[in-house]
Structure formats: C-alpha cells, structure tokens
Image: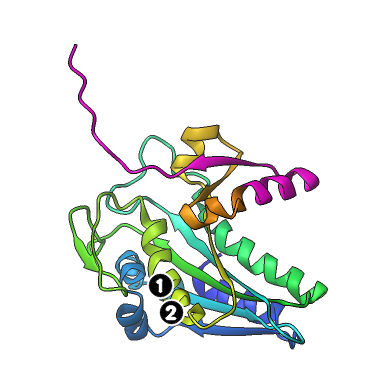
Amino acid sequence: MSAPNVELYVKQVFADTSCIKVDIISDEQVIEKEYPLLAAVNRAAKCTERHRARVIFLEYVPEGPVETTVVLVGKGVTYDTGGADIKAGGVMAGMHRDKCGAAAVAGFFQVLARLQPKGIKVIGGMSMVRNSVGPDSYVADEIVTSRAGVRVRVGNTDAEGRMAMADVLCHLKEKAENEPDPHFFTIATLTGHACLSVGDGYSIVLENGPARRAEVGTSLRQAGDLVGDMFEISTIRREVSVSIQI
C-alpha cells in the first residue's frame, strides 16, 4: 500500500471514532522544511504522485485526568529498494513489509478506540515513505541537517528507517515536553540488527539509559510472554574499534 493510500485507509478507519484525532502532512514543502531527513528519502519517489510521502499523526485523549503519555513513532517504508545502495542478490522481495512498524501504530490506536483506557494519553506518528532508486536518490556520504539542527552523514541509503523516523520523533518530543510522564517508543520491522542478533521472525527491544533503569524492556518481554508475542532484550552499545596485539 502506497503512502497516499495509507492516508485514505487511516482516515476511513477512524472516521467515526471521536476519541482518535488524525492529522495528515502531505504538502511537499512542509515535509522538506519540517522533516528534512524523511524528505531526503522521499526525493527519488516524489516524482511519482502515487509514491509521495505522508506523515500521519494520531492522538488519543482519554476522559478524565492524564497520568502518563505514550509516544509511538512507526517506520512506514511502503517499499524498500535499498535506494542507491540497492538491495541485490534477491533480497528485495518482501520489502513491502517494511511499513509494518507504522501499521502497528495504527493498529494500537484501533485498540485504544475500542477499549478507551483512562489515565493514558497516546500520540502516534507514522513515517510513510517509499525508498526508491532514481536520478534524484539521496546517496551515501551526503550530509543532511535534521529538524533538530544535527548534521547527519548518510552511511548507507538502506538505513532509511532512522532517516524516516528521526524528524517525526523530534517533532513529537517537542510536543510532549509539557505532557505528563512521557514515554517514547520507535517501532520498526525487518531491521538488520534484530535479524543478526536473534534470527528471522523474532522481535527485540532496545532500551536507552532511562528505559533500562525503568525496566521497560523487561515489562515488554513479560507482557509479550503472556500473549505469545515474545521479545528478546538487546543492548545498545557505543561503537568502538579495538586493536589487540599479541
């Protein structure tokens, strides 16, 4: 499903749901200004109207006071060719599933619409973009300045998921600064780290420092065990080069 069709689908799903607010960003100039990293991925796709990017925001506000805020950002790569660092050797098949992180966010909001839990506010972002290859593709060694003002050097265009999500995450961080007790989650699928760490078909959770201290990964793993959707806990480590002489 292309990004414009995801927009139509999400609008349809939540059309009669009063507790879910939907906001769509489709203007190319706004995307280039507000989400420059996602716009870089979108460059090779936007020449075809049916492939143009969308940023979709969802918001659930419960009845009564809010005690906790959950922020979800989903990777919504509608198809991943790898971009200029193209996926070769037959590994491109199945890359329509690279949007399942964003799909999980939309699915979570469907659950919220049905259960309408109290005390928790949920804000969701779906970063919908196609990682195409073409004459205007973004390339390795390109430097793009993010929404946060950080200059990002592209190492490989097949690492487009973090490009697609980073500015949306930054936007929601700005929005959540005044929200009570915010917790942030990014959701991605077909990630190389998960495949290399635990094999195909398994899910992992990666915690930053505050999440580790709050044992968020352990809580997710225990919840997953209850419903047969297991997580393995992986560890974020700083990349270092070590030379050992014997």
Say whether residue 14 is magenta. no
> In the rendered image, which residue does mark 2 sit on?
174
Instruction: Work out which residue is located at the far right of the displayed protein and give it.
Output: 115
Q: Is residue 144 above or below residue 160?
A: below
Q: Which is more toward the observer, 157 or 80?
A: 157
Q: Position of residue 119 (x, y in %)?
A: 73, 77
**Which residues make up the magenta segment?**
218-246
Kindly tell me whether residue 21 is visible in this rendering: yes
| Label 2 crowd (10 A; few <14 / some 14-19 / many >=20) | few
Q: Is residue 236 magenta?
A: yes
In this figure, which residue is indicated by the disc labeled 1?
170
On residue 64, which mark appears? none
Cβ atoms under marks 1 and 2 closer than 8 Å: yes
Q: Is residue 130 left or right of residue 18?
A: left
- Quarter of the rendering occupied by the N terminus: bottom right
Residue type at the position of mark 1: Cys
Q: Is residue 60 above or below residue 73?
A: below
Which residue type carries mark 2?
A: Glu
In this view of the protein, which residue sits in the foreground, 165 or 176?
Answer: 176
Tell me if mark 1 has few (under 14), some (14-19) or many (20+) residues whose alpha carbon lies within 10 angstroms of its own.
Answer: some
